[in-house]
Amino acid sequence: MKKLALSILAVFIAVPALVLGQNKYVGVKQCMPCHKTEKLGGTAYVVWEKTPHAKAFDALKTKEADAIATKAGSTKPAAETAECVTCHVTGTNKPEEGVSCEACHGAGSAYKAVHAKKDADDKAKAGAGMVMGDALKKACTDCHNEKSPNFKSFDYAKMWEKIAHSGKKI
């Protein structure tokens, strides 16, 4: 009976956070070590740090951003306006990171271990909660849409070419 109880307890402890609906953002520093060099897993980090996404939160700290927030009805600076922060920060817990890996690929706590395995296929990664392939378009258009006060247009395929990384195409 004791072994059964311990086995049941072990299952509850080992259940991935995603299954429990608790997948958490881990931050860009968890992704960077493997995605900074071609040798380790591609240059996604190097590509990202050169994009406006990396500095998206900084963009909210300008007078221009504050004016846009005010025009949209906010009484707070843009960097403190939820409607602005939602699209300029990933997970809203590390604003200095701007729009990072997990904005597109989902909160990483459940998939980071699977993703790190060299033999893990895309199905295993997706099963652990990693957003990939066609689902990435929704991640982009959640922010790049008519609700944004600066929206002009958004061509997903064209914009993907500007941020494509690790040799993968949409």
Image (spheres, helix red, strand yellow):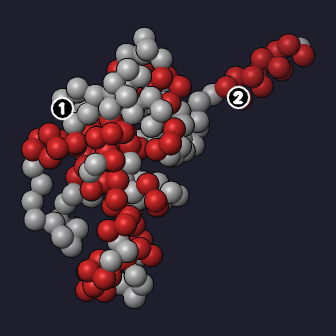
Residue 72 visible in this rendered orientation of the protein = no
Q: Residue at x 43, y 54 (%)?
A: 97
Q: Residues within 10 Å of mark 2 (few under 14, many from 20)?
A: few
Which residue is label 1 attached to? Answer: 170
Element marked by disc 1 = loop
- Residue, far right: 2
Residue at mark 1 to residue at mark 2: CA–CA distance: 36 Å
Q: Is residue 58 visible?
A: yes
**Residue under the image location 15 percent in, 66 percent down:** 151
Q: Quadrant of the C terminus?
A: top left
Q: Amino acid at mark 1?
A: Ile
Q: Residue 120, relative to residue 110: is it above or below?
A: above
- Mark 1 or mark 2, earlier in chain: 2
Q: Which mark is residue 12?
A: 2
Q: Is residue 154 above or below residue 116?
A: below
Q: Give how far across and how far down residue 102 sits, in percent.
A: 41, 44
Quarter of the image holding residue 13? Answer: top right
